[in-house]
Structure formats: structure tokens, C-alpha cells
């Protein structure tokens, strides 16, 4: 849910063997903003090292509560179970970070178990689906580009709206 709602690159939430994990989002980068004054709770996600961010301020995304399959509720539950220890948000019980390889293999296993063809989905599918969903909901190109932190028109390749046949 976090990868989808945050338009995240897989390298922002997983580690590669032998690579320093300083560019991976940390547990402390996820902050629950409590509900107040009639506004539902939200999740604030700080991205300190974006792919195309050379120098500058961190990027702060706000993921809002939703009535159906709420990402804030699910992420809050996970974070409660995970605990507040430092490090990446997705870790094994011994606090070892989840690798990209492990994430990919678990994604394939879950898709197979649910009856989907895992060869049609990859780790990048969350970002593709987020851009496509935003486009189908009427967000402008500028908004989609901003939400996904794209600095060029490359974001258009992520939007996969099927052509209608007559």
C-alpha cells in the first residue's frame, strides 16, 4: 500500500546486498498525523533521497485516509506491529531490512496464490498502477508528475490506460 499510494520506487523501500541503505526510507520518515477538526488522519511520508533529487530539501508526501481499504489504517497497523526501532520500515523480525530480491519473490508468490500471472507484474508495477490510477481519476499531467516526483515527461510511460475496442 505504501509503494502504491506514495508512488514509490522499489529502491526507496528495499535494499540491495552490498549497497548502503542510506537512500531507503526510514521508519522515522513515516509519521501518522492524527485526525483533528473534522479532518481524517493521514500519513506523512518524507523522502530524503529521491532518485533525481541532487541536493535540496526532503520531499514530504501526505497520504490521506480513505473510506475503502484505507492505506493509513493498514500502514498504522503494520507500524504498530513493526515497532519504532530505527531503520527501514520493512524489516524481518530481527530488524534486517527486506531486500529487493525478497520483495520481488514474495510479490510473485502472493500473485500466484491469488490466481494472477506473476510474469505480468514486477516491483515497478506499484508506481505504474499509481500513475495510471491518478490519470483515470482525472489528475492533470502536472499533478501526476509531482506526485511521482518525475522531472520529465517520462511519467507518461507509466500511465497504462487500455484502449477501448468497438
Image (cartoon, rainbow, N blue to C red):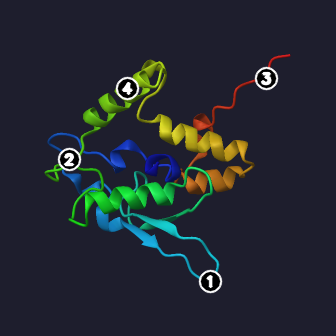
Label 4 residue SS: helix
Q: Earlier in the sequence, mark 1 or mark 4?
A: 1
Whichever of callouts 3 and 4 sits on the residue coming sooner in the sequence is 4
To which residue does mark 4 refer? Answer: 108
Sequence order check: which comes first, mark 4 or mark 2? Answer: 2
Mark 3 crowd level (few <14, some 14–19, many ≥20, 10 Å Cα): few
- Return the mark for residue 164: 3
Dot 2: within a 10 Å radius of its alpha carbon, few (fewer than 14), some, or many (20 or more) residues? few
- Asked if one can make out residue 78 in the rendered structure from this viewpoint, the answer is yes
Specify few, some or many for label 1: CA neighbours under 10 Å numbering under 14, 14-19, or 20 or more: few
Q: How far apart are marks 4 and 2 (CA)?
A: 18 Å
Of the pair 46 and 76, the residue shown nearer to us: 76
Q: In which quarter of the image is residue 37?
A: bottom right
Tag 2 residue: 92
Q: In this view, does 104 lie above or below 2?
A: above
- Label 3 vs label 1, nearer the camera: 1
* Residue 106 percent location from the top left of the image: 32, 32
Q: Name the residue carrying label 1.
A: 37
**Marks 3 and 1, Cα distance to the nearest angstrom?**
44 Å
Query: In this rendering, which labeled residue sits more in front, label 3 or label 2?
Result: 2
Amino acid at each position: 500500500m505504501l509503494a502504491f499510494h506514495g508512488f514509490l520506487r522499489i529502491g526507496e523501500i528495499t535494499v540491495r546486498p552490498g549497497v548502503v541503505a542510506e537512500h531507503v526510507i526510514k521508519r522515522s520518515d513515516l509519521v501518522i498525523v492524527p485526525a483533528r477538526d473534522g479532518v481524517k488522519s493521514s500519513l506523512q511520508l518524507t523522502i530524503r533521497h529521491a532518485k533525481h533529487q541532487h541536493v535540496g530539501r526532503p520531499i514530504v508526501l501526505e497520504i490521506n485516509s480513505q473510506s475503502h481499504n484505507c492505506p493509513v489504517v493498514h500502514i498504522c497497523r503494520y507500524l504498530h506491529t513493526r515497532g519504532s526501532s530505527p531503520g527501514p520500515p520493512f524489516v524481518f523480525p530481527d530488524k534486517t531490512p527486506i531486500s529487493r530480491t525478497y520483495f520481488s519473490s514474495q510479490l510473485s508468490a502472493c500473485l500466484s496464490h491469488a490466481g494472477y500471472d506473476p510474469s505480468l507484474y514486477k516491483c515497478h508495477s506499484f508506481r505504474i498502477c499509481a500513475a495510471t490510477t491518478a490519470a483515470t481519476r482525472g489528475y492533470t499531467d502536472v499533478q501526476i508528475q509531482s506526485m511521482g516526483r518525475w522531472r520529465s515527461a517520462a511519467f507518461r510511460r507509466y500511465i497504462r490506460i487500455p484502449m477501448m475496442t468497438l
